[in-house]
Amino acid sequence: MTSHQPSHDPDPGPVYDVVVLAGGEARRLGGADKPGVRVGGRALLDRVLAACADAGTTVVVADPRPTARPVTWAREDPPGGGPLAALDAGLRGLRHTTARYVLVLSADLPFLREDTTRLLLTVLRTGGADGVLLTDADGRDQPLVAAYRTPSLRTELAALTKEHGALTGLPLRRLTAALDLTRVPDPVASFDCDTWDDIATARARIREHGHVLDEWISAVKDELGIDLDVDTGVLLDLARDAAHGVARPAAPLTTFLVGYAAAQAGGGPEAVAEASRKAAALALRWAEEADGEKAAGAAGTSDTSPDAG
């Protein structure tokens, strides 16, 4: 059993690092390039990277490829040596960092979000365990959706290497069995895509009414390189008011102009909110004026009708 680090000791460097294992053979997908498979318009790997964008250092264990944000690349030797060998290669890529915590993630998690990764890290930092991992809908451990204390992983991987001579081919349970782990149930964030049926399920879920808008906004921000957390409800209300009070094409044009004005004002959520407020007020005034004209017209027609007077 690895000795625990103090639960509240300060970090001398970045809060956490990330190792993403993305070099598997994807046999159940017929050897397809699983990290590059798109769900909701984004590659699976990019979706995972978006959930940990504030990491100190991110190492992806795989052959290099284009990604939505810069990462450090590593590879186990020989390639295809299994998850423990890949994890060891990823940790070697972090040898120059000082973060005490590391997220270990697979590259096929379509529903992983930043709030989940932050939860894993918070539970780890405030508790005394070596790691915190998610469990899936069947209660099974998911050690590749987890946060660990970096020294704990290094110690146990070194012990396994000494015992077996190499990590190639060893299952992950050889590592997790030696660690004190806390478990957090989350059947959604732990959902991974091992088969084409899983891919189809993920694509269908993302297009459900309750998810599609958030997914689309996230995809657009990734595609445009925008890191901006805005109240989409405000923008939707503005679009509705513009469409109703002016004309339907006014909705997208107005929200575009709001974005442009916010950028001119320095950007940020506050600038978007202020520009939205001004445009929404204008749209409401426009609608009130139009409604007043309609009411006046109806009254005039009534006054000049044959039955009047």
Image: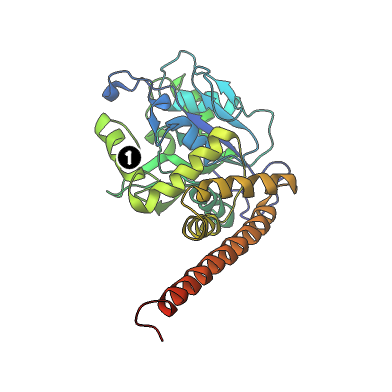
Q: Tell me the kind of residue under disc 1.
A: Ala
Q: As rendered, which of 193 and 104 lies closer to the eye?
A: 193
Of residues 68 and 209, which is closer to you in this image?
Answer: 209
Q: How many labels were placed on the picture?
A: 1
Residue 178 image-quadrant placement: top left
| Residue at (63% x, 61% y) in the render | 277
Residue 99 location, quadrant: top right
The image quadrant where one finds the C terminus is: bottom left
Tag 1, which secondary structure?
Answer: helix
Establish if 285 lies above or below 304. Answer: above
Q: What colour scheme governs how the chains and residues are painted in the rendered image of this protein?
A: rainbow
Q: Give above or below for 8 relative to 31.
A: below
In-image side of 171 versus 154 (left or right) = left
Query: How many residues crowd around disc 1 within 10 Å: few (fewer than 14), some, or many (20 or more)?
Result: some
Q: Position of residue 278 (x, y in %)?
A: 66, 60
| Percent position of residue 85, x then y | 46, 23
Residue 7, given in percent of the width and then of the height, sits at 61, 54
Residue 177 appears in the picture as rendered? no
Task: Please provide percent x and percent y for residue 120.
Answer: 51, 50
> Quick one: 202 or 191, which is closer to the camera?
202
Give the residue pinned by disc 1.
Answer: 202
Residue 90 higher or lower than 293, as above or below: above
Seen in the image, is 21 located left or right of residue 28? Answer: right
Residue at the bottom extreme of this rendering: 309
In the depicted structure, whether residue 277 falls above or below residue 265: below
What residue appears at the point 68 percent right and 50 percent down from the top-left corner?
A: 268
**Residue at 62% from the left image edge and 29% from the top image edge:** 94
- Evaluate whether residue 207 shows in this view: yes
* Relative horizontal placement of residue 207, taking residue 217 as reference (left or right): left
* Quadrant of residue 37 within the rendered picture: top left
